[in-house]
Image (cartoon, grey):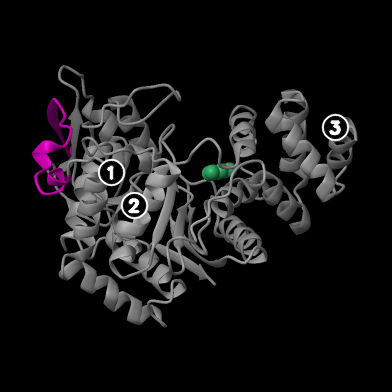
Amino acid sequence: MRMYDLIYRKKLGGALSAEEIAFWVQGAADGSLPDEQSAALLMAICWRGMTTEETLALTLAMRDSGKRLDLSAVPGLKVDKHSTGGVGDKTTLILGPIVAACGVPCPMFSGRGLGHTGGTVDKFAAIPGLKVELSEAEFLRSLAETGFANSAQTADIAPADKKLYALRDVTATVESIPLITASIMSKKLAGGANALVLDVKCGPTAFMKTLEDATALAQSMVAVGKAHGMQMRALITRMDAPLGWAIGNALEVMECVEILRGEHGHSELAQMSFRLAAEMLVMGGAASTLEAAQVLVQASITNGTALEILRRFVALNGGDAQALDDFSRLPQAGQVVPVCADRAGYVAAIDGRALGILAMDLGAGRRDRNDVLDLGVGIRVLAQVGQRLAPGDRLFEVYAKTGATVAPEAFRATLEWSGEPVEPQPWLLAALT
Ligand code: URA
């Protein structure tokens, strides 16, 4: 088999066989094929797409490039969640403990942040002492003892994805439905859960800008998961303004704990987390309808069991569980700088991507993979779309390093204003089962 022939056929829009795809993925992972040939094929796939059969074969070849986790030692259906990522998206820290508190084991592998979006691993790393890279034995113990396990993706899960993703990152080939599907689903299938709910983000700051594209991605991932015996559901959710009030790692932990304490229950972040948790509870067999599942979700908040699961998960994995009740034990910023409105009007839009970049510049995110984060810095977003504001009203509080210069106009520029009242758009755009 010659890689040249595969690239040539895909360039003309032809399909590759499962054997050809396996040949490519194996060669990319073990280094026997040159990067330029993989990069050329990735670009051809971006332009020409893949059939459902090809996407399935690519997912399987990537899954089988590494280890598959066996979670059968933990009884019951194991349910996972994947979000395609957005600024301020911290639903894992909220829904994982809720789902576990309702009796459904929730095993999750997460990523570190890069660029304007944060990563769940970095948010957990803001809890002092918490081990965020668990061994397989530690992961299983956490799942068995608390019902919840979260760890950074280990290098032996779908290593071909790591290699191909790094190439996609530098060749502008990330935004391709078959490539995103295979990348995400290979890791999810290797992770060993029985069911998966997807939160596919849609909007100007997401991979998928239109409802049509987001629906196509969700359908593609649902089809691949189902073909491999995974129960699948997907929500398509709007992504433009930041999700919740916090951007930045320790601040995001605080916001999640507040929601688990029963605060901000009507916020978009809480509503989205509760709905995703309810979907997971139905798939895990804890409830037969979403309405019944929502009752369980609310009970886990009001009776404190969800927050207690988070405390137990943190303590079991070496973290300071008291930091969840005493936020002064979390990493702190050197200074807090308020940014106020310089005009009157209604907030028409908030640019989440721009705020994500500003948070990255403060040290909350990575410009480069090797950057070291400042876990205490970030942004408290006080302005909300639809809100009527007067000059001098607080828009943001910027949590910065001591001595850092904060330019208020850069933060003010992330807002769009209107002279007329603005109706906030619903966060849930569509649901697929
Ligand atoms: N996240 C992934 O893990 N893979 C992609 O291709 C895109 C987002």
Label ID, residue 317: 1
Q: Mark 3 or 1 closer to N-term? A: 3
Percent of width and height locating residue 343: 19, 41
- Residue displayed at 64% across by 59% down: 220
Label 1–label 2 contact, CB within 8 A: yes
Percent of width and height locating residue 336: 13, 31
Instruction: Check if residue 259 falls in the magenta segment.
Output: no
Between 14 and 141, the one nearer to me in the picture: 141
Residue 240 in sight here: no
Query: Dot 1 surroundings within 10 Å: few (below 14), some, or many (20 or more)?
Result: many
Label ID, residue 3: 3
Of the residues shown, which amino acid type is indicated by label 3? Met
Of the residues shown, which amino acid type is indicated by label 1? Asn
Percent of width and height locating residue 409: 25, 29
Magenta span: 321-342
Q: CA distance from mark 2 to mark 3?
A: 43 Å
Q: Residue furthest top?
A: 403
Q: Which residue is tagged 2?
A: 142
Q: Is residue 274 left or right of residue 228?
A: left
Q: Mark 2 or 3 closer to N-term? A: 3
Between 372 and 13, the one nearer to me in the picture: 372
Q: Quadrant of the N terminus?
A: top right
Of the residues shown, which amino acid type is indicated by label 2? Ser
